């Protein structure tokens, strides 16, 4: 049987998914399963790593069974994953010693303050491309070692392993033979030197993390080992963090090309080529991918709460039954008085970087109803994206001609039209919005020689182009209201 399929594992913050691609890059099928979000204390967010593994392998088996795909016809597996989420496990048993601490988790803010007091901000920025923030993995590792009984001693003896979710999956898929990650995920730990492409001794010392804990770092297209199904070996041949995979899947191969992914968070990346461009406007510098013997870099702006704000409407305040209902209710409030929702549930990311901000609603009047709050929640995604675009344009000196979008919330036409209006820029939505999974599939396929980068460009088709229709005066008034609302949420939790 010819090897005609690629499997893309897309391990996200709220669900595990597997997408099956055919040899032409078309989607054959998708299987998805949500898993628990664990909130032990205010500001803490955890996942059960075993549940991540079981749901992820479950969706892989399901999509193959649903489409009667024999393992011998799968050419390769690509992995893309929620980044920064941190797991520490026992090298002998493969069991986690604590739940995965999720990227949204705020418990390590005091550790970040300690690093800042040691004068490490400049070093972190220049070496890792990041800012000191509880978002990244390094402080999460330290917290686990400090707070799980016996963990520090066991780590010193080489008995434990740390990984982001890609490493956790690779370890188990290869039966503990491979402890590895790729450049993109390593660049999100606050422990990795993105210039020298090696773990940074100064940060390891500052956080008291033994080097024996860390995975090997490989290019994004690489043979990471084999996953055996029914006696058949399938190479794991591509790995990239979710946002870098989406940048790749959107064919943003040239410097200045940018995409925005509307997932649990909102993440905008602009390719800067082989140049490491440090931001003056609160963006971070990250590795875009390692491919064909070279490393490309990107500027990134991270919005912590995007699609998660729509989940909040559904699960916490029960204003909608399903996420897709938000479009219907928002349409009923179009043209009404302006209400602003600032969804700083996990602090504010770029360009503000305020761990102590918290969510708020502004502009409520007696006639404000649920439609207005739903509409304002959707609009908050677009406003936060504008914050990032402004910062990127200033850093790069490049004006975005258009924005490529993907992720679940980009299917919402009201949101995409408002995004175009508030940016004053065209917004391009591709036919296939599974850019993240597609990026992982393409990296794996390139590694085994099945596809080339040119194929991605040829395969990408635009489904709809949203064009701005808002007057400048209206745009400026709305945006200045947003900036005022954000300012009032900042520092809310600080003493």
Image: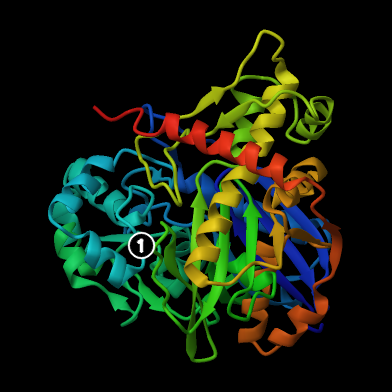
**In this rendering, is residue 226 above or below 337?**
below
Q: What residue sits 67% from the left and 8% below the top?
A: 366
Front-most of 473 and 116? 473
Q: Position of residue 49 (x, y in %)?
A: 45, 48
Q: Say which residue appears at 50% left-offset and 77% top-offset.
A: 224
Q: Nearer the viewer, residue 40 or 408?
A: 408
Residue at the right extreme, as displayed: 463
Answer with the quarter of the image where residue 91 lies.
Answer: bottom left
Residue drawn 18% across and 42% down?
A: 149
In this rendering, the count of numbered labels is 1
246 lies above or below 390: below
Residue matched to label 1: 130
Q: Give the quadrant of residue 190.
A: bottom left
Q: 84 left or right of 367?
A: left
Percent position of residue 330, x then y: 78, 30
Instruction: Please identify the quarter of the rendering in which residue 373 is found.
Output: top right
Q: Which quarter of the rendering shows the C terminus?
A: top left
Residue 76 rendering spot, x and y as whole percentages:
66, 77
Camera sees residue 390:
yes
Secondary structure of residue under mark 1: loop
Left or right of 226? Residue 283 is: left
Determine the residue positioned at 33% across, 60% down. 162
């Amino acid at each position: 049987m010819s090897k005609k399929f690629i499997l893309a594992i897309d391990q996200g913050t709220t669900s595990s998914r597997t997408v099956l691609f055919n040899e032409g890059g078309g989607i054959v099928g998708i299987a998805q399963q949500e898993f628990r979000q664990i909130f032990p204390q205010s500001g803490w967010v955890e996942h059960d790593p075993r549940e991540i593994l079981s749901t992820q392998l479950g969706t892989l088996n399901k999509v193959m069974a649903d489409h009667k795909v024999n393992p011998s016809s799968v050419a390769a597996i690509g992995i893309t994953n929620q980044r920064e989420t941190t797991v520490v496990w026992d090298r002998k048993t493969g069991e986690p010693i604590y739940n995965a601490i999720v990227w949204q988790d705020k418990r390590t803010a005091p550790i970040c303050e300690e690093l800042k007091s040691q004068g490490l901000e400049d070093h972190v920025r220049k070496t890792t491309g990041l800012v000191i923030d509880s978002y990244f993995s390094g402080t999460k590792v330290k917290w686990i070692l400090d707070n799980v009984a016996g963990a520090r001693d066991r780590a010193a003896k080489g008995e434990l392993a740390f990984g982001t979710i890609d490493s956790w999956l690779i370890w188990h898929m290869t039966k503990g033979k491979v402890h590895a990650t790729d450049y993109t995920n390593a660049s999100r730990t606050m422990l990795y030197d993105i210039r020298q492409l090696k773990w940074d001794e100064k940060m390891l010392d500052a956080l008291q993390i033994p080097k024996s804990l860390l995975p090997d770092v490989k290019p994004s297209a690489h043979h990471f080992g084999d996953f055996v199904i029914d006696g058949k070996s399938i190479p794991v041949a591509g790995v990239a963090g979710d946002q870098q995979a989406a940048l790749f899947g959107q064919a943003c191969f040239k410097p200045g090309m940018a995409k925005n992914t509307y997932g649990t968070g909102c993440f905008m990346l602009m390719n800067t080529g082989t140049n490491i461009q440090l931001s003056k406007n609160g963006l971070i510098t990250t590795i875009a991918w390692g491919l064909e013997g070279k490393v490309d870099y990107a500027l990134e702006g991270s919005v912590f709460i995007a699609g998660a704000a729509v989940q909040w409407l559904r699960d916490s305040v029960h204003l909608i039954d399903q996420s897709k209902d938000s479009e219907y209710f928002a349409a009923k409030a179009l043209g009404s008085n302006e209400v602003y929702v600032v969804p700083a549930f996990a602090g504010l990311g770029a360009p503000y970087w305020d761990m102590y901000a918290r969510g708020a609603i502004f502009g409520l009047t007696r006639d404000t109803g649920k439609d207005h709050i739903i509409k304002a929640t959707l609009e908050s995604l677009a406003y936060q994206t504008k914050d990032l675009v402004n910062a990127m344009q200033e850093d790069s000196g490049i004006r975005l001609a258009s924005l490529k979008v993907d992720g679940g919330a980009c299917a919402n036409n009201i949101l995409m039209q408002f995004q175009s209006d508030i940016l004053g820029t065209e917004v391009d939505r591709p036919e296939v919005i599974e850019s993240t999974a597609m990026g992982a599939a393409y990296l794996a396929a390139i590694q085994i020689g099945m596809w080339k980068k040119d194929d991605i460009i040829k395969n990408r088709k635009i489904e709809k182009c949203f064009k701005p229709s808002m007057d400048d005066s209206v745009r400026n008034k709305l945006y200045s209201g947003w900036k005022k609302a954000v300012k009032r949420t900042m520092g809310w939790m600080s003493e």
